Image (tube, rainbow, N blue to C red):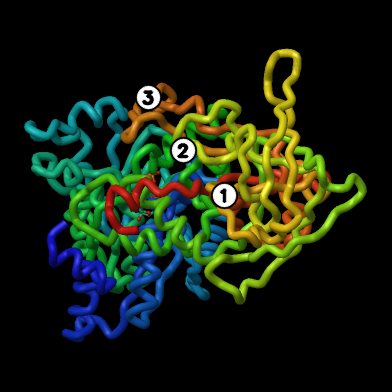
Amino acid sequence: MALTETAALEAGRDFIRDIVAADLAAGRHRSVVTRFPPEPNGYLHIGHAKSICLNFGIAEEFGGRCHLRFDDTNPTKEEQEYIDAIERDVRWLGFDWGGHLYHASDYFEQLYQWAEYLIREGKAYVDDQSPHDMRATRGTLTEPGTDSPYRERSVDENLDLFRRMRAGEFPNGARVLRAKIDMASGNINLRDPTLYRILHAKHPRTGTTWSIYPSYDFAHGQSDAIEQITHSICTLEFEDHRPLYDWFIANLPVPSQPHQYEFARLNLTYTVLSKRVLTGLVREGHVSGWDDPRMPTLAGLRRRGVPAAAIREFVKRIGVAKANSVVDFAMFEHAVREVLNRTSPRRMAVLRPLRVIIENYPEDKTETLEAANHPDDPGAGTRQVRFGREIFIERDDFMENPPKKFFRLAPGREVRLRYAYFITCREVVKDESGDVVELRCTYDPATRGGNAPDGRKVQATIHWVSASGSVPAEVRLYNHLFTRPEPNAADFAADLNPQSMEVLTDSRLEAALASDNIDAAVQFERQGYFYRDPDSTPGRLVFNRTVGLRDTWAKVANVA
Ligand code: ATP
Ligand code: MG
């Protein structure tokens, strides 16, 4: 990244914000109006979050407004479920469109009138060619297309046919309305693009009123013009469409002239940000749904425990550029950790329990010990954790034959139980197949709270829960959904990670987690951040690992 770009990023600026600022300073606009225009054919993903933060962010920063507009021009793929999910997700991210909720379908009548206008101007015609012939006569990047035999139809004939298309007289695909621009244009988008197609389909909002629907290209820019959008911000794929959008704006009596600016879409390693692929994952059952915590959707990330603030912070850090690139997933996780480290209450949980009996602790006794909710924030207070004769520690925190650098529990060795006592391992109990099933330990009553009065040291502090002070739980650990940093979108199933989810069914959680009323991720000490899953029932908690504690990005970027 160039130095100037880094400086701009730190100042929260980018080339689009510079353009907006310059336009306002020069009086080209009195206030800025942007929009976020999703097509309701799937759930929003973190790539959309980049666009949402940019559009709503600019409106906020410059005192303008941002519209939410559903680009609902394709009734065969669009559903109310997606409309509801998109509204919920934009709100969850922290943005508000106020009263400015619109739909391309609000403008169907106006768009239709503008199509007739183009016909009357001799700038649009009804084409009867088959879809196959239309493709064949379109030409290629190096060869011009050829004119349709229907290109020179009279205005009257075109008007008549177009009105009959609207009236539903013809079957799907029989005819289209095309703009009459230039079949030899170097830009394929200008080779007489389709404006309207016949589609006898029920629309979620307009029902069966229409049997023709405008193309995305014909609806998009004109919708912006109707809403007086000042800066139409979109991703780079639409750069080649801009001349077409400008042609419509120049050739129609639209109420304003929006200008389009393109930025690089977000790509993230080890995942895919394509609705087509995400839809495939859901339909083919590779994930449990759009909100599967492994999905890069906002619904999935939310269910995983990622806070909206972390997504906003991540988007701010990646900035807005004009060249496509791929962002390391570890950078996203780094932002999540930073936010959660600041805000998450600490709890103890043993994911893979190993039973420990404290032999010299009285059978019928339990006691409560005080534990800090956040090590750096005394204001977060403390909580009580129950200690007793039977406890659980993490299997990984014990080794029967420890190598040199393993400092945690081992036969004959003393360690500290966090917030509790020093314990020493006296005996290892195994089952008939030789697996360790229990440890017999002793504790030193003088070390209550975790310090020895004689000043003796131990080399490790481990977490624990007591049998009577914990509840059973299922914990779901997640890894990358794909095995390769840049999965093949054409054959995504081949790159799926068979180990993307690991389910631990006999974890034990500190009892406070059963009664906590925290709707946010918590830190399980020494493990990572975890968030309660809606699959939880009163009798059985289910937690998702949002992200582990180990930060690979901090190392790469040297930013920790
Ligand atoms: P599809 O994959 O169906 O073409 P899409 O991902 O482009 O869909 P839209 O609903 O058309 O989805 O997107 C709404 C807006 O979000 C568009 O302005 C689009 O440019 C932007 N957007 C989509 N994907 C990304 C991304 N990865 N990064 C940044 N912006 C994105
Ligand atoms: Mg799109």
Q: Disc 1 versus disc 2: distance between alpha carbons?
A: 50 Å
Q: Nearer the viewer, residue 47 or 359?
A: 359
Question: Which quadrant would the N terminus be assigned to in this image?
Answer: bottom left
User: Can residue 89 be seen by looking at this rendering?
Assistant: yes
The tag earlier along the polypeptide, 2 or 3, is: 2
**The furthest residue to the front:** 454
Instruction: Tell whether circle 3 marks a residue whose Cβ is less than 8 angstroms from ligand 1.
Output: no
What's the residue at 25%, 53% (across, down)?
264
Task: Say if 92 sits above or below 211 in the image.
Answer: below
Image mark for residue 278: 2
Tell me the kind of residue under disc 2: Leu
> Percent from the top left, x then y, of residue 482?
42, 32
Say which of marks 1 and 3 sits in front: 1
User: Can residue 166 be seen by looking at this rendering?
Assistant: no
Q: Secondary structure at mark 1?
A: loop
Q: Disc 2 versus disc 3: distance between alpha carbons?
A: 12 Å
Tell me the kind of residue under disc 3: Asp
Q: Secondary structure at mark 3?
A: helix
Q: Nearer the viewer, residue 241 or 137?
A: 241
The quadrant holding residue 501 is top right
What's the residue at 72%, 41% (across, down)?
392
